[in-house]
């Protein structure tokens, strides 16, 4: 734990956090504007598994993969999943450092709040597990097991839950940071009068 804390603390420079944030969102933008729409052209309006925060079941996966057809499944495998194998790393690292950066600014990094830095890492790991499950099911369709579908679904839900909790926590931390800055400016303004 001390080693992880040290790694996070030594990488909390504004430039590094900003660069990782920008790279993460470039990869995300590519998925939202290129790879996901390209894959969805074959889905007849059905959502891709990556885009279902509340999960899915074996029947839905079969329906989606059947609707995608061979070409759509190939696009999912060769376009969407490769980009989505890059994104979880950037998401986990950049948002871990982003929340750590603001916790540090609030002098809360060495408190229980430090554990919030793990939320994006958990989401990233769950995203990798989800992607591996999707990859396995696409490669074995129509002969993938219901167990693979259930396990992949669990990782999808874990990814969604940890991401949601992370963004709620980040929003609250940013509000705390904003309030701190307003108080500092008010105090500085009162002292100069």
Image (cartoon, rainbow, N blue to C red):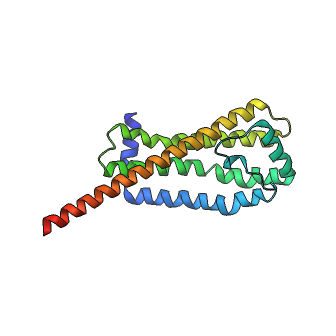
Image point 85% across, 54% down: which residue? 71
Image point 47% across, 48% down: which residue? 168
Q: Is residue 16 left or right of residue 78?
A: left
Q: Point out the residue furthest to the top here.
A: 147
Where's residue 48, x and y in %?
73, 50
From the viewer's side, name the closer residue of 88 and 68: 68
Where's residue 70, x and y in %?
86, 50
Please indicate, yes or no, whether residue 153 appears anywhere in the rendered image: yes
Q: Is residue 2 left or right of residue 137?
A: left
Where's residue 186, x and y in %?
22, 63
Q: Quadrant of the N terminus?
A: top left
Image point 78% across, 31% down: which residue? 146
Please indicate, yes or no, whether residue 11 appears anywhere in the rendered image: no
Image point 70% across, 50% down: which residue? 81
Q: Quadrant of the C terminus?
A: bottom left
How many numbered badges does the structure rendering display? Answer: 0
Where's residue 15, x and y in %?
40, 60
Q: Point out the residue furthest to the bottom here.
A: 193
């Amino acid at each position: 734990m001390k080693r992880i804390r040290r790694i996070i603390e030594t990488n909390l420079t504004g430039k590094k956090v900003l660069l990782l944030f920008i790279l993460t969102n470039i990869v995300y933008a590519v998925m939202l504007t290129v790879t996901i729409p390209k894959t969805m052209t074959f889905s007849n309006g059905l959502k891709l598994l990556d885009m279902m925060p509340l999960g899915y079941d074996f029947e839905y996966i079969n329906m989606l993969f059947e609707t995608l057809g061979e070409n759509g499944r190939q696009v999912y495998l060769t376009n969407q999943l490769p980009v989505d194998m890059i994104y979880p790393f950037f998401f986990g690292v950049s948002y871990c450092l982003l929340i750590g950066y603001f916790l540090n600014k609030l002098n809360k990094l060495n408190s229980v709040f430090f554990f919030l830095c793990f939320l994006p890492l958990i989401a990233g790991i769950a995203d990798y597990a989800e992607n591996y499950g999707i990859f396995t099911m696409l490669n074995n369709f129509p002969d993938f097991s219901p167990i693979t579908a259930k396990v992949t679904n669990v990782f999808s839900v874990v990814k969604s839950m940890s991401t949601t909790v992370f963004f709620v926590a980040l929003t609250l931390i940013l509000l705390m940071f904003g309030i701190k800055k307003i108080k500092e400016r008010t105090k500085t303004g009162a002292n100069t009068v």
